[in-house]
């Protein structure tokens, strides 16, 4: 299966180049861990209370002091570090470019363009996801009954991942300063639609499997849970970036797996 080959190649790209991967992402991901750990540990009780209220259909009238600014700061650091890492990792895999400093260079133009493409794709997927979610709820809800709550989100996730892979070749292109349009990305991956569908299913299964250990621990703020979430979060991020890099290398540059 071509989809499986792409996935395995992406995993090997990360673990076969662990030194450069850590050099590129180490400092930036550590900054995210510090930000996220502070946010989770400081507001853990408040976050649980809000989740319970929302689950009961109650919208909190007032957020705890400091929660919203901390949440936005955590989001900003997480987003910026992931964009920074993505650009550098694309460039390492495709150009063999390795940063020589502890704090990797901030490639302003490329990271800004990457952010712009991220926002565009996120908005497109959000609109499509809402419409598709409503359609799936109407079409499959009565058929699946009690399983609908679990099955529909997985189907939706798979479809959105498929679209992300088909359209996502714009991201490595931006990192290489050879931008392409979403339309071009879609057209270049047309012949690989079946393989990318397989890849989307594999990604959904992968996401489910890595959640099993943390779901067995009811305390999300426990040291074991936090360490596990950061480790698998790093792996998922790096493999996800590598998947787009692999797709770009194969379907834009004509490389062999």
Image (cartoon, grey):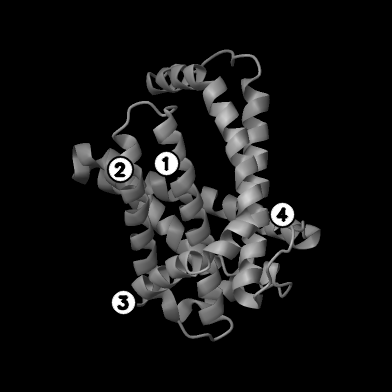
Pointer 3 local density, CA inside 10 Å: few below 14, some 14–19, many at least 20: few
Q: Vertically, is 107 above or below 55?
A: below
Q: CA distance from mark 1 to mark 4?
A: 24 Å
Which one is in front in this view, the residue at disc 1 or the one at disc 4?
4
Closer to the observer: label 3 or label 1?
A: 1
Q: Residue 1's mark?
A: 3
3 vs 2, front mark: 2
Q: Which residue is mark 1?
A: 228
Return the residue nearer the eye: 247 or 123. 247
Q: Tags 2 and 4 in contact by the CB under 8 Å rule?
A: no
Give the quarter of the image for residue 1.
bottom left
- Count of numbered badges drawn on the protein: 4
Q: Tell me the number on the disc at residue 212.
A: 2
Q: Secondary structure at mark 1?
A: helix
Q: Is residue 142 left or right of residue 39?
A: left
Please name which of the two marks, 2 or 4, marks the residue nearer to the observer.
4
């Amino acid at each position: 299966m071509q989809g499986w080959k792409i996935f395995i190649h992406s995993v090997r790209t990360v673990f076969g180049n662990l030194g450069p991967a850590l050099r590129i992402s180490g400092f930036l991901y550590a900054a995210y861990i510090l930000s996220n750990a502070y946010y989770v540990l400081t507001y853990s009780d408040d976050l649980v209370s809000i989740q319970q209220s929302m689950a009961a259909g109650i919208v909190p009238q007032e957020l705890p002091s400091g929660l919203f600014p901390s949440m936005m700061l955590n989001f900003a650091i997480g987003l910026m570090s992931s964009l920074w890492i993505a650009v550098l990792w694309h460039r390492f895999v495709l150009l063999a470019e390795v940063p020589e400093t502890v704090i990797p260079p901030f490639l302003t133009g490329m990271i800004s363009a990457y952010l712009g493409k991220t926002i565009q794709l996120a908005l497109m997927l959000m609109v499509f996801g809402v419409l598709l979610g409503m359609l799936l709820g109407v079409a499959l809800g009565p058929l699946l009954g009690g399983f609908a709550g679990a099955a529909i989100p997985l189907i939706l996730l798979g479809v959105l991942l498929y679209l992300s892979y088909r359209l996502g070749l714009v991201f490595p292109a931006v990192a290489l300063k050879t931008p392409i349009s979403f339309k071009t990305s879609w057209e270049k991956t047309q012949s690989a639609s079946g393989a990318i569908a397989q890849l989307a299913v594999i990604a959904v299964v992968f996401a489910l499997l890595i959640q099993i250990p943390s779901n067995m621990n009811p305390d999300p703020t426990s040291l074991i849970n936090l360490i596990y979430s950061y480790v698998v979060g790093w792996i998922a991020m790096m493999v996800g970036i590598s998947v787009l890099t692999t797709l770009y290398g194969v379907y834009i540059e004509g490389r062999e797996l």
